[in-house]
Image (tube, helix red, strand yellow):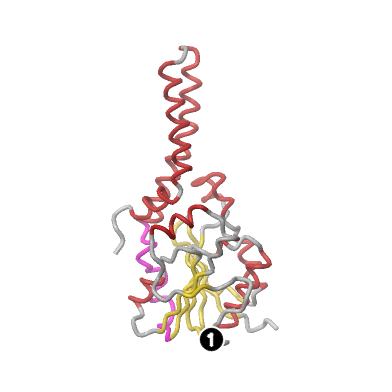
Amino acid sequence: MRKPLQGLWNVVRFNWPLYLVAGGAALTLVAGWLAGPAAWRPYAGLLLALALLPLLVSLLVTAYVYDFSGLYRFDWLFGKVPVPATLLTLSAGFDEISAPLARQYPAAHLLAADFYDAARHTEPSIQRARRAYPPYPGILAVDTRAALPLAAGSIDLAVAFLAAHEIRDATERAAFFREIARVLAPAGTLVVTEHLRDPANFLAYTVGFLHFHSRRAWLETFRAAGLRVEREVKITPFITSFFLRQDGSAA
């Protein structure tokens, strides 16, 4: 079970240097506003507002998305796909999906795969998350540039939850998704859940939205991998899930 405001707390502690710098800048501006010349105070106050408003908005949006929106109840997933006999979870150093899937589908054979590579996925936040949370029991390390150790057509449901954006190179991303398509059963489903590089996430995270991929980039990845979008769901204005199937027309 998730604790109250666990999502917000995780984001803050995994990205604490950013918030430390923002807090230090805000304190400097407050000091300038209080102790500086009277003529400077309106400008210091304006700068303080401009510094704090984006930070406050990002924190409020983060709390909404990760703690109050129902994202982690997984109602957008459970009951929306057939009950799988075999399922695959894909994470990038921080696995939040294997445990709820295992609880929801206790009879299914679950394989948890982690494609985190410390040499290429250099986000400090991932390293902090890995120190804070132990890996899912039996999780398998895989390489996005190599074949998955699974037979073709062996997976009924694959889920990549807030992870696949860490594959920054488009060619590498398409090749990895081609591998996922290979191991999907003919009637299997791949669910990819992500923030998008779109206006809503820009308003929420300003330049931080550049860490996400655009909807167009994702569609190009899916197309190159021989996958088609069966359904696209906006879980919140900031989170999108793509439900994908093998594209029977792909060669």
Label 1 SS: strand
The residue depicted at 38 percent of the width and 76 percent of the height is 79
Q: Which residues are magenta?
A: 69-85
Q: Nearer the viewer, residue 50 or 28?
A: 28
Task: Please tell me how many numbered marks the rendered image carries.
Answer: 1
In percent of width and height, residue 162 lies at 49, 62
180 horizontally vs 88: left or right: right
Placement of 34 over or under 155, stated as above or below: above
Q: Position of residue 139 (x, y in %)?
A: 44, 74
Residue visible at 52% across and 85% down in the picture: 187
Asked which quadrant contains residue 6, the reply is: bottom left
- Give the labeled residue for mark 1: 185
Residue 77 magenta-highlighted: yes
| Residue in the picture at 45% in, 75% down | 112
Image quarter of residue 133: bottom left
Amino acid tagged 1:
Ala
For the stretch drawn in magenta, the main secondary structure is loop
Q: Position of residue 242 (x, y in %)?
A: 52, 69
Residue furthest out toward the top:
38
Q: Is residue 48 above or below residue 148?
A: above
